[in-house]
């Protein structure tokens, strides 16, 4: 059992500032996670060389792998800091911000692009008004089962981090938004926007730019059926494009 916890953290003082590495050593306690270590550093921001420094900036909220806010690269793998247990990590523990998103400061990144992509594909169910319209249409258990799995997406960014098609040279919207198209198109009310969502996927940066690397599903902390969703929407967009052309 180690007496100390050694962390090596990639830091950045602002969006336009250069990155640099800083190391910290804190006392070991059992059953700590990465968030707890960062909080210890925040209480006493002194680096491994004994010099006073600024507290490390990161983002967190739920602390139970539901919100996805604390996602960062831990020992080379994108995951949530709240469920990354120190006792199961090799030291030194290397913490880096997600590389596919702009850095705000230190380990905190701007994931706004993911939410913009969700808006682009209309990842919501329209309602008729603000009044009570009663219970919605029933969904078959077969559809509900896989649609529920897709609803567990945290928009954490792990799939985007693992996808080679998400890079500065590509406008690919990524597997998160694409999978949500499948989810909302299967909803009896959401199906009213089915064609608009498929059209959005057929535009620049859409599903045609998926390279089928299949890294996304392996990286997803919730194990969502992303590969199946991508495959089905490849087929749906192809059929939509062919029949749309024939109707002209």
Image: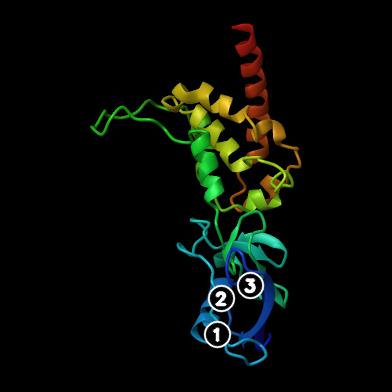
170 relative to 63 in the view: left or right: right
Residue under circle 1? 45
Look at the image and tell me whether residue 73 can be seen.
yes
Q: Earlier in the sequence, mark 1 or mark 3?
A: 3
224 relative to 215 in the view: left or right: left
Residue that appears at 53% across and 56% down: 68
Tell me, for residue 11, which label it has, or none: 3
Residue that appears at 67% across and 70% down: 19
Residue under circle 2? 56
Location of residue 90 with respect to 206 vertically, above or below: below
Q: Are marks 2 and 3 in contact (CB under 8 Å)?
A: yes
Residue that appears at 49% across and 65% down: 60
Q: Is 87 or 106 nearer to us in this picture?
A: 106
181 relative to 236 in the view: left or right: left
Look at the image and tell me whether residue 149 can be seen.
no
Give the distance between the C-alpha atoms of the residues marked 1 and 3, in whole angstroms: 13 Å
Q: Are marks 2 and 1 in contact (CB under 8 Å)?
A: yes
147 relative to 90 in the view: left or right: left
Numbered disc 3: secondary structure? strand
């Amino acid at each position: 059992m180690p007496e100390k916890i050694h962390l090596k953290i990639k830091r950045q003082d602002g969006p336009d500032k250069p990155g640099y590495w800083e190391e910290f050593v804190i006392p070991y306690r059992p059953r700590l996670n990465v968030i707890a270590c960062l909080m210890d550093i925040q209480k006493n921001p002194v680096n491994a060389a004994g010099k006073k420094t600024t507290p490390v900036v990161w983002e967190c909220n739920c602390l139970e792998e539901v919100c996805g806010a604390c996602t960062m690269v831990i020992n080379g793998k994108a995951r949530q800091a709240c469920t990354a247990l120190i006792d199961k990590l090799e030291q030194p523990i290397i913490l880096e911000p997600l590389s596919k998103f702009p850095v705000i400061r230190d380990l905190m990144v701007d994931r706004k692009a993911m939410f913009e992509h969700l808006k682009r594909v209309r990842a919501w169910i329209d309602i008729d008004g603000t009044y009570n319209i009663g219970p919605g249409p029933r969904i078959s258990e077969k559809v509900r089962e896989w649609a529920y799995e897709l609803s567990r997406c945290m928009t954490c960014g792990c799939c985007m981090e693992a996808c080679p098609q998400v890079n500065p040279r590509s406008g690919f919207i990524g597997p998160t938004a694409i999978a949500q198209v499948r989810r909302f198109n299967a909803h009896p009310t959401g199906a009213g926007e089915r064609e608009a969502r498929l059209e959005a996927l057929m535009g620049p940066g859409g599903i045609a730019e998926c390279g089928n690397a299949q890294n996304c599903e392996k990286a997803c902390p919730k194990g969502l059926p992303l590969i199946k969703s991508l495959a089905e929407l490849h087929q749906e967009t192809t059929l939509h494009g062919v029949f749309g052309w024939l109707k002209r």
